[in-house]
Image (cartoon, rainbow, N blue to C red):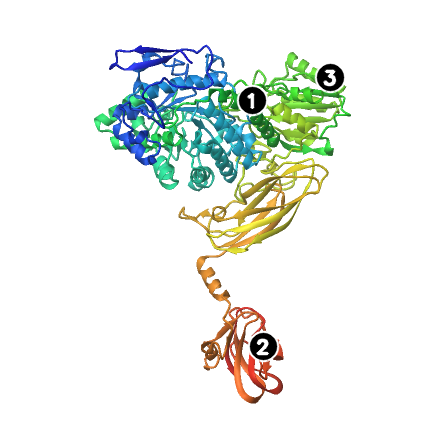
Amino acid sequence: MKNLIALTLLLGGSTLLCAQKPAKTPATYKPVKSEMYRKGWIDFNKNGVKDVYEDPSAPLEARIENLLQQMTLDEKTCQMVTLYGYKRVLKDDLPTPEWKELLWKDGIGAIDEHLNGFQQWGLPPSDNAYVWPASRHAWALNEVQRFFVEDTRLGIPVDFTNEGIRGVESYRATNFPTQLGLGHTWNRELIRQVGLITGREARMLGYTNVYAPILDVGRDQRWGRYEEVYGESPYLVAELGIEMVRGLQHNHQVAATGKHFAAYSNNKGAREGMARVDPQMSPREVENIHIYPFKRVIREAGMLGVMSSYNDYDGIPVQGSYYWLTTRLRGEMGFRGYVVSDSDAVEYLYTKHGTAKDMKEAVRQSVEAGLNVRCTFRSPDSFVLPLRELVKEGGLSEEVINDRVRDILRVKFLIGLFDAPYQTDLAGADREVEKEENEAIALQASRESIVLLKNAGELLPLDINSTKKIAVCGPNANEEGYALTHYGPLAVEVTTVLEGIQEKTKGKAEVLYTKGCDLVDAHWPESEIIDYPLTDDEQAEIDKAVENARQADVAVVVLGGGQRTCGENKSRTSLDLPGRQLQLLQAIQATGKPVVLILINGRPLSINWADKFVPAILEAWYPGSKGGTALADILFGDYNPGGKLTVTFPKTVGQIPFNFPRKPSSQIDGGKNPGPTGNMSRINGALYPFGYGLSYTTFEYSDLDITPRVITPNESATVRLKVTNTGKRAGDEVVQLYIRDVLSSITTYEKNLAGFQRIHLEPGEAQELSFTIDRKHLELLDADMKWVVEPGDFVLMAGASSEDIRLNGTLTVEDYQTRAKAIEAQKPAKRVSASTNPEDAENVLDEKINTAWQGNKGDYITFALKNGAKVDKVAIAFTRDNNLPATFEIQLSGGGGQFLTVYSGTVSEYGKLISYPFKGTTASDLRIVLNDDRVSIAEVKF
């Protein structure tokens, strides 16, 4: 049982319960026994009555309104702000008596990153007593929560927020690859598992809101935050974002807050200026690329949080835009959660954008626009106090405040804070966080994220039995920092590439290691434009690596980027390998020994020299704490790489913007013939295109089928195909389906991603896959900026990458009027005879060509003849809308229901009576039988 000191404060006679560090963390958390905690409900406002908002069985909106009616302006405005956690803004780890005198005596909306150990401004990760183990951390957050539940008037619980795009940002937690790496798995189920684990571990640690996923779409490879996106395709970002949110919000364990809304990831020239980015693009591109993922994730996964971005669009800061935060987000997309600002985004309205004269005006603009919660590195007073002044002065309606607070309370109710505000299973936190099953999924995520870019001569996988000496070098060979960056776990155990190779080859091969060079040189980034000579120390380190390579059977060179070259505020002006890395690689290659290049980085790099001269290249992105193990598994054939690129590798920054999807004219060739007498003026094509990735095995695509081949805009079609592993190793293939609108009223993309599946096949195994094509794949924004499906043909293409198309077929979309006519025309005509449907028979005996009986193949019309009449010919007037040839038969019956064919032929002319003779005989009935569809008989004469 924890020790608690009850201090009576002279503040309205209330009692403040302040926590002391327990000697031992208990297995379960039990708040102070008081009359507040009733069976099945909590008396948050301490009035002894079960209010509607305290009743778990009451309707959600009723609970919200009941609580809102009881709140004062001070309590409402306190819900609209985040308090940054321990040693950022909040100086205390646990509640103190002073808290009853501070702003949050009336509650607080959220506390961000409290006690998580984030190393900001030189802060050591173990700077508090509650950072680890998980049970102790959860206990501490419970104690903070208890202050808000027990010692504020209405007891509104706080929302504990944290980052989580690669695992929850805690001192320890399951560590996954960076989000860019996760995108390269193309594995929906795996991404859902990542979300499920992240959300579960966050809740067990005491957090209730995770700032993930990133729904930005990569457009400029130089951008520092490229490492945080899933990829370039808005469809892929949406599909994986949906799964991440479904995992995070499973059983409402936490709220997922997607970021950054809107148009944040297309900064002109990859510059990060005063307002972070400067997006300059057309409204159509904003809708097609940047809004699309948010719209789908909100509608299909019910995402409960959205973070508003720093930037403007077309001169209007998103943070102060009613159009973006209310009209679009809430009105069109149906968002029902709360909007939290990116840190300092409110302040940017007057400090950066210059659209507000001071903080008070920035607060007014933001709240009127639709902001619910302000997040910042400053005291919450700087937002709350001007907000209260605005309401009291009439500058802002309290009804606007009510609307904003409703959204905040809705999220808190949905994630169960009013039913279970504490994480009571403290022992469970120690069991769940970083448990073995979670670590296994993290390892699999690392494996699946790695892309084989080149494998000349099948150098990989290496034969562990014949490889006796391995040289390993490069600045990332023994580096851990790439797994310990912001927005993920902070102090986990990392297996480096060197350690992974050493563990894999223990007792079988000798591993020679030297760093070879640093990530960047002393002059970087100026050294990207000025060729500084190598220093003596730099040359000596490269020489060591060369000597090791000469002694070895194979050299593994681990290059790329890191926190110095990529990340928030780390955009680049080049995509080349930074520092002395290329010189190191060239020196190793010059030894003549086989070279494997491993890239660990956060953006595509222009590795043209390596692609031309290095036989094997693996792209690992930032592969997480298990990255070294995953790479060793791939190097030695224990795992067959199957990742595919979700980004484009340009050959040079001069090609940027170069990404997927793109318009037909965006990368037109600058000539075909190089040299002084040629016509080539620019570098053409991608180094590696979107969707690209190799394997240690091969796959064959076959049997494409589209059913049905004709649909209307709101119908769907199924695309089926077969994929066979034709190689000798088991492996994964990411099967990709693309779509192209053949003819449209506006210029559309060359191809759009329309589906994908990652499958595993044993050697010789085949699998049939199916994809559904529906309205979301067919829509375009027309000239009036309306989402429509235009009738016409759509080419469907299945392949191994956007440039490696193996199968294709055509789907036709027809408008509703055409479909209605077709349906009417295709209705089978009733089988008629003079005895059963005399009205239809009369149509062919009324001497009017414009009235007819119509039938399909196999249908017939029967005429009764005078008994014993001899007949040797009949004149028939046929009609057919398409005038295509049609065949028919004339049959006679002498009675008894049996008919004999006396004439079989083709309609010679439509729209007029034509006589068809046959051998004469007596008969009682004459029948005309159709052998084709949609053929009409207008007149018959005997």
Task: Please determine whether, in this image, residue 465 is positioned above or below residue 514.
Answer: below
Q: Position of residue 39 (x, y in %)?
A: 35, 26
What residue is shown with label 3? 547
Q: Amino acid at mark 2?
A: Ser
The label number, if any, that marks residue 231 in the structure image: none
Residue 367 visible, this orientation: no
What residue is shown with label 1? 483
| Residue projecting furthest to the front | 39
Tell me whether the residue at label 2 lies in contact with that at label 3, contact meaning CB atoms closer than 8 angstroms: no
Q: Amino acid at mark 1?
A: Ala
Q: Amino acid at mark 3?
A: Glu
Mark 1 or mark 3, whichever is nearer to me:
1
N-term mark: 2 or 3: 3
Element type where label 1 sits in the image: helix
Element type where label 3 sits in the image: helix
Q: Is residue 313 left or right of residue 456?
A: left
Tell me whether the residue at label 1 lies in contact with that at label 3, contact meaning CB atoms closer than 8 angstroms: no
Q: Position of residue 916 (x, y in %)?
A: 59, 82
Local crowd at mark 2 within 10 Å, few (<14), some, or many (≥20)?
few
Q: CA distance from mark 1 to mark 3?
A: 30 Å
N-term mark: 1 or 3: 1
Q: Quadrant of the N terminus?
A: top left
Mark 2 or mark 3, whichever is nearer to me:
2
Task: Please determine whether, in this image, residue 803 is positioned above or below residue 389.
Answer: below
N-term mark: 2 or 1: 1
Q: CA distance from mark 2 to mark 1?
A: 79 Å
Q: Position of residue 73 (x, y in %)?
A: 26, 25
What residue is shown with label 2? 908
